[in-house]
Image (cartoon, helix red, strand yellow):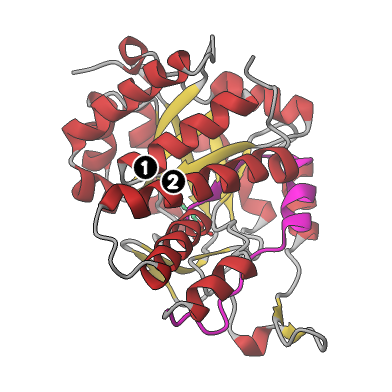
Amino acid sequence: MVNYKDLGLVNTREMFAKAVDGGYAIPAFNFNNMEQLQAIIKACAETKSPVILQVSSGARKYANQTLLRYMAEGAVEYAKELGWEHPQICLHLDHGDTFELCKSCVDFGFSSVMIDGSSLPYEENIALTKKVVEYAHQFDVTVEAELGVLAGVEDDVVAEESHYTKPEEVIDFATRTGCDSLAISIGTSHGAYKFKPEQCTRDPQTGKLVPPPLAFDVLAEIEKKLPGFPIVLHGSSSVPQEYVDIINTHGGNLPDAVGIPEDQLRKAAKSAVCKINIDSDSRLAFTAAVRKVFAEKPGEFDPRKYCGPARDEMTKLYKHKIIEVLGSDGKAE
Ligand code: 13P
């Protein structure tokens, strides 16, 4: 058993309380490898932003759970080395689907876990979430739950259709489970293809897809029911078209990739939404940078020469999100 406090990590409780009060959101960036982790920590250290490092069960399998634990511990030390005196870094399980997986993460030094019972019938979601909360809270590990279904693909999580969260259920769910935060469905979606072309309109000038707006009325209803309760948005990549274009003009093929416009996320961050999940944008930044090097320097075969530029591009992306979208810069001095 490893307690996250011994690794220098923090849970989400205080982060979220401050974010709800301050009208900003904490970035929750997924990582699978060293370059992503370096880029996240560098961006957060340079902007003094609290951060949630997210690991999906797929990432855990890919990177190895033992290595991940030491990477998170190393991240705290790296942050200090970069001059960030009091790093606020949370290690979070993204989309845990069983009690056993959540327990194993709590036992391995995670400071926060998500139990995603959103595909289960309501009462089963409550029972599973409650069981995870009861275990995690013994070690002061915070728990995110989900109500409502997001469309899209994210590692092992696939859903064809979305169902908005029902505001009339949130008080009962939060009270009976004791969860610390709630992921809701208001129209965001996982992956780089968040909407089908038929759900969008097209910008007549650029020909690019314009997605439908998020359901801010549903968010407002939920906020009214649970004032001050931390709300989480998954599937919040914006799918920057400049990355999609770089990928497509350098041998890639991502037709009609589309995300959530940043102005909508900025608006959400000012509300009770205090955690915004971003994974696909970092994948796109990485891939765009790597494809560019491969196309421009076909003789290159030193991974540092293409992973290095990819890391720089991701650092730029994370800083942009922190400063221009979430407003979390300067909140962890
Ligand atoms: P994106 O695919 O929009 O980056 O969403 C990531 C996510 O929600 C992880 O849980």
Report the front residue among 146 and 68: 68
In the rendered view, does 182 fall on the left or right side of 263? left
Q: Write down the quadrant of residue 259 in the picture.
A: bottom right
In the rendered view, does 206 fall on the left or right side of 97? right
Report the front residue among 288 and 93: 288
Instruction: Please tell me whether residue 298 is drawn above or below residue 114 in the rendered image.
Output: below
Report the front residue among 281 and 61: 281
| Element assignment for label 2 | helix
Magenta residues span 252-279
Q: Is residue 53 in the magenta section?
A: no
Image location (x, y in percent) of residue 240: 62, 64
Q: Is residue 257 in the magenta section?
A: yes
Which numbered marker is on residue 243? Answer: none
The answer as to whether callout 1 falls within 8 Å of ligand 1 is no
Image location (x, y in percent) of residue 282: 49, 53
Q: Residue at x 64, y 14 (%)?
A: 333
Report the front residue among 149 and 266: 266
Callout 2 touching callout 1 (CB < 8 Å): yes
Residue 152 at least partly seen: yes
Image location (x, y in percent) of residue 62: 21, 50
In the rendered view, does 118 fall on the left or right side of 207? left
Which numbered marker is on residue 311? Answer: 2
Q: How many other residues sit within 10 Å of disc 2, few (<14), some (14-19) or many (≥20)?
A: many
Mark 1: amino acid: Glu
Q: Residue at x 29, y 61 (%)?
A: 300
Mark 1 = which residue? 35
- The quadrant in which the N terminus is found is top left
Instruction: Please tell me whether residue 103 is drawn above or below residue 193 in the rendered image.
Output: above
